[in-house]
Image (tube, rainbow, N blue to C red):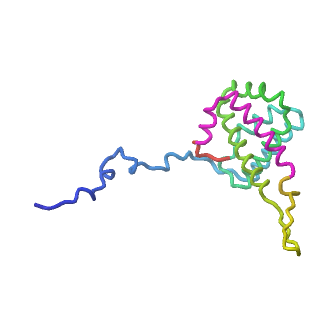
Amino acid sequence: MATVNWRTINIDALDPDSPANFDLSTLTATVAPVSTADVQSLAGQIRQLLRGGDNEGALQGALENPPYGADERGKDVHLATVIEILQSIRQSDMSPMLGRIYKSPGGTEALDVLMKYIYKGMSQTNAASTTRNITPQATGFSQIHSRGGGEGGGQAMSVLLSWHEKVVEIAGPGCIVRVMTDRRTV
């Protein structure tokens, strides 16, 4: 009789329903590639709406067309556009505007995209505020300059935190969970 060491058999390889036999590429949504020029063109159109006083239209336009397939430069251009829109909207207009967006078709997805941009904006301003210019002095002490690195970062963070509060108020905490589990990044 042959001796078989049963502990060395990989039973997951034999089970078709095992996670080891699951193709992980099916979890990633396919996104069409977007050029930076297309993102810049869209940003120009959105800024035109913003200059015309249509804040809600600019916000909806930015949230309906997130450049998932763009490179990092294109994503940064769109992030700057979204943050510019968010900073231009008064705090008293936030809740009614978010309520109208939420009730419109595709409103849940739009607020999820907005939450993605809020989190990305928070990570960008947080990284910018931690960078400091350190100048070594002849005395052996270093002089820390906060200008240039973190000026204005607190105001941007305050705006993003206000938007975060309002989005969670309108869309609920499920919005945070959906953003954290979505594999598409903005």
> Which residue lies at the image location 65% right of the left edge and 29% below the top edge?
172
- Nearer to the camera, 95 or 51: 95
- Nearer to the camera, 64 or 98: 98
| Chief secondary structure of the magenta portion | helix
Q: Is residue 40 above or below residue 139?
A: above
* Number of numbered discs on residues: 0
> Which residue lies at the image location 70% right of the left edge and 55% below the top edge?
72
> Which residue lies at the image location 32% right of the left edge and 53% below the top edge?
13
How far across and down, in percent of the image, does residue 147 sit?
88, 57
> Which residue lies at the image location 70% right of the left edge and 44% below the top edge?
119
How far across and down, in percent of the image, does residue 32 sit?
63, 48
Residue lying farthest to the bottom in this orientation: 138
Magenta span contains residue 118: no
Residue 101, picture quadrant = top right
Which range is magenta?
Answer: 151-180
Looking at the rendering, in which quadrant would you find the N terminus? bottom left
Residue 96, picture quadrant = top right
Residue 88, picture quadrant = top right
- Nearer to the camera, 78 or 31: 78
How far across and down, in percent of the image, does residue 97 sit?
78, 27
Q: Is residue 18 above or below residue 9?
A: above
How far across and down, in percent of the image, does residue 182 sit?
59, 42
* Lateral position of residue 104 relative to residue 31, left or right: right
